[in-house]
Image (tube, grey):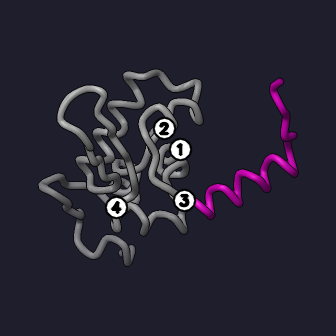
């Protein structure tokens, strides 16, 4: 039996998963969640700052992914002000910060793959 699955399943917030890898991928999987976490790992950002750093993500997708990350406790959303224009800041929670070593490992591995099999390009 795998050590990460001492029982037949694992459970978090009422959801049951076949293993911890499945749980992890539910929290941070998909095309944009890890990218969002990467952009928040060094500092808190406003929504528009995230949009500028990820120009190919749609507004709807970014908004949905941020809500999911917030609901899962990875990202904090703080609203400043009562009426428009309000200021909304996103940052990693303490729980979200525990994922930084994984983000660093993903970044290192991705850089290695590009160096060995691809190329870094600039779009001007």
Indicate the secondary structure of the residue bearing disc 1: helix
Q: Earlier in the sequence, mark 3 or mark 1?
A: 1
Our reading of the magenta stretch's main secondary structure is helix
Residue 86 horizontal side relative to residue 99, left or right = left
Seen at 35% across and 39% down, the residue is 66
Give the labeled residue for mark 2: 32
Q: Residues within 10 Å of mark 1 (few under 14, many from 20)?
A: some
Q: In 3D space, how far apart are the residues under numbered discs 2 and 1 (Cα atoms)?
A: 5 Å
- Indicate the position of residue 85 as horizontal and vertical percent values: 30, 28
Which mark is drawn over residue 82? none
Q: Earlier in the sequence, mark 4 or mark 1?
A: 1
* Range shown magenta: 103-124
Q: In 3D space, how far apart are the residues under numbered discs 3 and 1 (Cα atoms)?
A: 13 Å
Which mark is drawn over residue 35? 1
Q: Residues within 10 Å of mark 2 (few under 14, many from 20)?
A: some
Q: Earlier in the sequence, mark 3 or mark 4?
A: 3
Of residues 5 and 98, the one nearer the viewer is 98
Q: Earlier in the sequence, mark 2 or mark 3?
A: 2
Q: In 3D space, how far apart are the residues under numbered discs 3 and 4 (Cα atoms)?
A: 12 Å
Seen at 36% across and 53% down, the residue is 22
Give the labeled residue for mark 3: 42
Q: Is residue 51 above or below residue 105?
A: above
Which mark is drawn over residue 93? 4
């Amino acid at each position: 039996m795998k050590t990460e699955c001492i029982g037949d399943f694992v459970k978090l917030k009422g959801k049951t998963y076949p293993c911890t890898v499945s749980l992890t991928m539910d929290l941070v999987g998909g095309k944009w969640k890890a990218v969002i976490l990467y952009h928040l790992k060094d500092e808190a950002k406003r929504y528009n700052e995230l949009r500028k750093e990820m120009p190919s993500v749609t507004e709807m997708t970014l908004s949905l992914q941020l809500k999911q990350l917030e609901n899962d406790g990875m990202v904090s959303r703080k609203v400043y002000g009562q009426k428009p224009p309000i200021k909304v800041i996103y940052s990693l929670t303490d729980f979200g910060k525990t994922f930084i070593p994984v983000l660093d490992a993903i970044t290192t591995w991705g850089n290695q793959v590009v160096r060995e099999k691809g190329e870094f390009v600039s779009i001007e």
